[in-house]
Structure formats: C-alpha cells, structure tokens
C-alpha cells in the first residue's frame, strides 16, 4: 500500500527533513509513526498524499508512484485516500452534514447519492444526532469524528492521520482511536503519526520511529530478527 | 454547474464594489474599441464610396494630334491597374460641366475647357498610393498638360481612418490591460476568502479544473456584463452623434456579438491568470 524507497526530502530553507528513508506498509496494516517533534512524521505523511514530492528516491502509494505520476493524476490518488489532522480542518460556516457532503460534492458524486451516503457516514462515526450542528457547537472529539467521516466519504483504501488525537483529552482520544481501529478492521490501511506513547504501548500495533529525519526503529523488522535483547539489530 | 453558478454569484455578493469596478473597466475598454471602431467604420464606408468614384483626369495639351492621343489612350488602357480610359473632347467636357453646374452653365464658353483622358482604376487599385503612382506615370507622357485626382482629401480621409483605428487600438488595449488586472484582483479576493475551502477540495481530490471553474464563470459573467454596458454606452454615443452631428452607421450584429464576447474573454483571462497563480502558490 505504501512503499518508500531511499526517500530523501530536502527543503530550501530548513534543509534535510528526511534522509534515505525506506519502509513498506502492506494492505490492511495499522501503523504508528512516532518520534520527537521535527523528526519528519508530518513530512512522511505529506509525501504519502503527494502534498510534497521527494527530493530523491521513490514514494509508491495505492499503486501510484511519485516518480511517474502526472500533476493531473494527483486528484485521482487523493480520492483513494482519507486524510485527517490534529486541527480537524472543518469548514466553520457549514453544518456537519454539509462538511461531509462537501467531499462528495467536489469530487463529482451524483447529487442524489450524497444525502444517503452522508447519513451512513454519520452513523458510522456515531454522530447521527448532530447532523445539522455547526463545528463550533461540537466537542473536539466530535469534530474529529466529523473529519474522519469526511475522510471516509470516498471509501479510501488508506487513511492518513497526522496526530488525530493531539488536541483531545483521554476519553476522546480513546474514542477516536477506537474508531480508526474499527476502520482498519474493515480492511482499510491506516497510518497514524502520534506523540502519545501510552497509546502506542497499549495498542501493540506496528510502530515506525523517526529521529532527525531517519527511520531508527521498525517494530516489524525488530520482531523478524528476534526478540529485543536476543542480539537482533533494529 | 449549479455549484459553479452559485459560487459566481457569491463572488459578487462578497465584494460588490470591486465587482462593479471590474465590470466598469471592462466596459470602458470595450467602449474605447467601440467609439474609435465606429469612427473607423464610418470613414471606411465613406472611403469605399469615394473610391468608387476615384478618377484620374489627364488633360491633353493643346495641339496634340488625335492619333497621338488615341495611341496614348491604348497604351494607358493596358496598365494592369486601369479599368477604362475615356477620351473626353473639349466640347464634351463643356457639356458635362454645364450639366454638373446647372444654372451656372452659361458662364462657360466653348474652348475654355481642355480635352482629357479620364482614367478609371480597377477595384483594389483605388487607394491613394496606387492612384498617385498611376497619376505620376500619366504625367510623364508628352501629351499631358496636367493630371488631377482628388488627392488631398482622399489622403486626409485615409489618415483620419488610420488615426482613429490606432487610437482605438491603443486606448482599448490599455483599458483591456487595466481591466484584466482589476478583474484579477477581484477574483483574487474571492480566492483568498475561499482559501480554506480550496485547500480541503484539493485534499479530498477535487481537480484543479473543478476548483477553477466557479472563478472562471465569475470572471466571464462580469466580462459579459462589461461588454453589454460598453454596447449601451457606444450605442448612446452613436445615437447622439447621429441625431446632432452626422448620420452614421452602427456595427452589424456580428460585430456587436463579437464585442460582448470580447468582454467575456477579458473577464475569463483576468480570472484565469489570478486563479492559476493562487493554485500554483499553494
Ligand atoms: N513546508 C516546509 N518547508 C520547510 N521546511 C519544512 C516544511 N515542512 C517541514 N519542514 C521541516 O522538516 C522537518 C520535519 O518537519 P515535520 O513537520 O515533518 O516534523 P514532525 O515530526 O511532524 O514534527 P511534529 O511532531 O512537531 O509535528 C522540520 O525540521 C521542519 O522544519
Ligand atoms: Mg507533525
């Protein structure tokens, strides 16, 4: 689903953000991306939805390659992905249902299909009763659920989440995380950047750890080369 | 499409003053084209009538033999520009002058008017330069006494037409440039007001074409209104001129439609430039 091959990302003013990063995420996996602030987590995710292009190396996502893709094909890729952020990125002047419907409307969904689809998505994220509320009238956890519903609107094969629980308290965090696990359980690949080490420890999912733009730990690779302390190199 | 039209309408609601300004500058641009275009058009049709009557008259010197004259006439008739050569005797010239001048006819006495060769040029050879060139060649014949053609005022009309055309083009293009800039900044306001929506549209996979279309429609609608306003202004000016100064002719339907379309294109270009710049910058 995601394959990074010796990906380097260099920015004009801030220099190298990622250096020769390689990893593979298979269809159906749930992967955490961890590491200190500035390590390059968001940069990796932006490369995944081709908001940024690698300076060197290749990013393959959902069958498309950063090397070969034309600018006009980027929207096609984005329709296969769902992206959510720490700050929700909802449109404040539209209701919950309008925010979700927006993603369908602007990608050319048949108008008649939008209403029922929005209804199903709202039920899925547990917000059927808040359809006509505005984002400002919802709690942080609820707003993130709206953002998730919007991300699911085009039936993505991959959900990309950049610190989706960063602004939420414990209870809301658990709720949103569980929702992402449910989405994963139904077959959608999920990659999630987070600072929340407790969450990572409890969840026992595959974890990729970054530091200063380098991939320093991959729990899948560590498991394959033997238990920690038994002589296996990370 | 309904989404696009709605957004175009919202663009107007969001910044009505700038929107009106865009429409007005587009209108002025096309008004400049229109006014000077009308002048050029009317001079051109006047010139076409004048050109029909363009005639070079080579007066035959006294004492030229009839043989020499008719030989020269045959010679001149073979020029590629020349349609016909008519020999007008002294007596015929007098008859013609009497007819043209009516009541003053008895002023003339036989023999006052010289005989002449009247040369008419083929259509397409009646412009001042060709007329002048042919006249010069006629002058070089021995028999000619003097060669006349309405040179001064034909050339004056041509010059006025050229100035009108040039002035219209210069002013029109200057206004068009201003119009593109102003409509560009108007659209830019709408784009910035919707920057958040645009970023979400891109995130969920809307195409650039889809994102652009409401702004392009917005620009084209404003341009069309500008074109219609210019048409009204030009028509009012034309009516005033026709009533108080001189009967003139107006553009035909084809040119009118073309003018309004030009407004739409101006609006389209202005907004396309502005939106593309924004989409590239994010
Ligand atoms: N658009 C950009 N232009 C220039 N430099 C950038 C850009 N985006 C990221 N960087 C740089 O890349 C490095 C990694 O940034 P990134 O946002 O990926 O870190 P992060 O791991 O997501 O951090 P955080 O946990 O604080 O979100 C940083 O040093 C940052 O300055
Ligand atoms: Mg980040």
Image (cartoon, coloured by chain):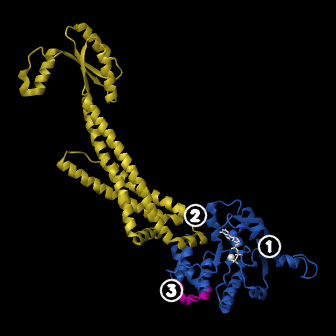
Chain of the residue under the numbered disc 3 shown in the image: A
Query: Does the CB distance between marks 3 and 2 fall below 8 Å?
Result: no
Task: Answer above or below: position of A139 versus A19.
Answer: below
* Colour of chain A in the image: blue
Q: Please give left or right for residue B102 compared with residue A46 in the image.
A: left
* C-alpha distance separating marks 2 and 1: 31 Å
Cβ of mark 2 under 8 Å from ligand 1: the answer is no
Q: Please give left or right for residue B42 compared with residue A157 in the image.
A: left
The N terminus of chain A - image quarter: bottom right
| Element type where label 1 sits in the image | strand
* C-alpha distance separating marks 3 and 2: 34 Å
Residue B221, located in which quarter of the rendered image? Answer: bottom left
Chain of the residue under the numbered disc 1 shown in the image: A
Q: Bounds of the magenta span?
A: A124-141
Q: Which mark, residue B281?
A: 2
Residue under label 3, please give it.
Answer: A132
Crowd class of label 2 (few under 14; some 14 to 19; many from 20; radius 10 Å) = few
Q: Please give left or right for residue B213 compared with residue A48 in the image.
A: left
| Element type where label 3 sits in the image | loop
The C terminus of chain A - image quarter: bottom right
Residue A87, located in which quarter of the rendered image? Answer: bottom right
For marks 3 and 1, the one nearer the N-term is 3
Residue at the far front: name it. Answer: A13
């Amino acid at each position: 689903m995601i394959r990074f091959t010796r990906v380097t990302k260099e920015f004009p003013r801030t220099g190298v953000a990622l250096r020769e990063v390689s990893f593979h995420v298979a269809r159906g996996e749930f992967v955490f991306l961890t590491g200190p602030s500035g390590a390059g987590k968001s940069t990796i995710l932006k490369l995944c939805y081709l908001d940024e292009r690698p300076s060197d190396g290749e990013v393959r996502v959902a069958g498309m390659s950063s090397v070969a893709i034309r600018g006009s094909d980027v929207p096609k890729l984005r329709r296969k992905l769902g992206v959510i952020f720490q700050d929700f990125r909802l449109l404040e002047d539209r209701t919950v249902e309008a925010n979700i419907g927006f993603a369908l409307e602007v990608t050319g969904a048949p108008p008649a299909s939008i209403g029922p689809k929005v209804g199903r998505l709202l039920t899925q994220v547990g917000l059927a009763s808040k359809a006509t509320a505005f984002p400002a009238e919802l709690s942080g956890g609820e707003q993130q659920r709206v953002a998730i519903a919007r991300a699911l609107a085009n039936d993505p094969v991959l959900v990309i989440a950049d610190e989706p629980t960063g602004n939420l308290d414990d209870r809301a965090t658990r709720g949103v995380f569980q929702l992402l696990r449910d989405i994963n359980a139904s077959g959608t690949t999920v990659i999630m950047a987070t600072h929340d080490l407790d969450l990572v420890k409890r969840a026992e999912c595959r974890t990729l750890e970054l530091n200063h733009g380098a991939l320093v730990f991959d729990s899948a690779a560590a498991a394959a080369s033997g238990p920690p302390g038994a002589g296996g190199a990370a | 499409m309904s989404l696009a039209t709605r957004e175009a309408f919202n663009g107007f609601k969001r910044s009505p003053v700038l929107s009106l300004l865009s429409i007005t500058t587009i209108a002025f641009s096309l008004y400049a084209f229109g006014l000077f275009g009308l002048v050029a058009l009317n001079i051109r049709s006047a010139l076409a009538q004048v050109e029909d009557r363009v005639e070079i008259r080579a007066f035959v010197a006294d004492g030229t033999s009839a043989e020499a004259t008719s030989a020269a006439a045959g010679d001149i008739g073979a020029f590629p520009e020349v349609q016909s050569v008519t020999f007008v005797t002294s007596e015929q010239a007098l008859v013609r002058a009497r007819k043209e001048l009516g009541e003053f006819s008895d002023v003339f006495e036989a023999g006052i008017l010289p005989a002449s060769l009247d040369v008419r040029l083929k259509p397409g050879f009646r412009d001042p330069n060709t007329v002048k060139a042919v006249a010069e060649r006629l002058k070089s014949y021995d028999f000619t006494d003097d060669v006349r053609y309405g040179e001064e005022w034909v050339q004056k009309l041509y010059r006025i037409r050229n100035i009108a055309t040039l002035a219209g083009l210069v002013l029109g293009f200057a206004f068009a440039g201003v119009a593109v800039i102003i409509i560009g900044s108007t659209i830019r306001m709408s784009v910035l007001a919707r920057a958040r929506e645009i970023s979400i549209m891109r995130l969920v996979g809307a195409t650039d074409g889809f994102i652009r279309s409401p702004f392009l429609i917005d620009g084209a609608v404003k341009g069309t209104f500008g074109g219609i306003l210019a048409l009204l202004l030009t028509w009012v000016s034309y009516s005033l001129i026709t009533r108080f100064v001189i009967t003139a002719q107006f553009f035909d339907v084809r040119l009118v439609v073309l003018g309004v379309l030009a407004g739409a294109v101006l609006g389209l270009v202005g907004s396309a430039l502005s939106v593309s710049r924004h989409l590239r910058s994010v």
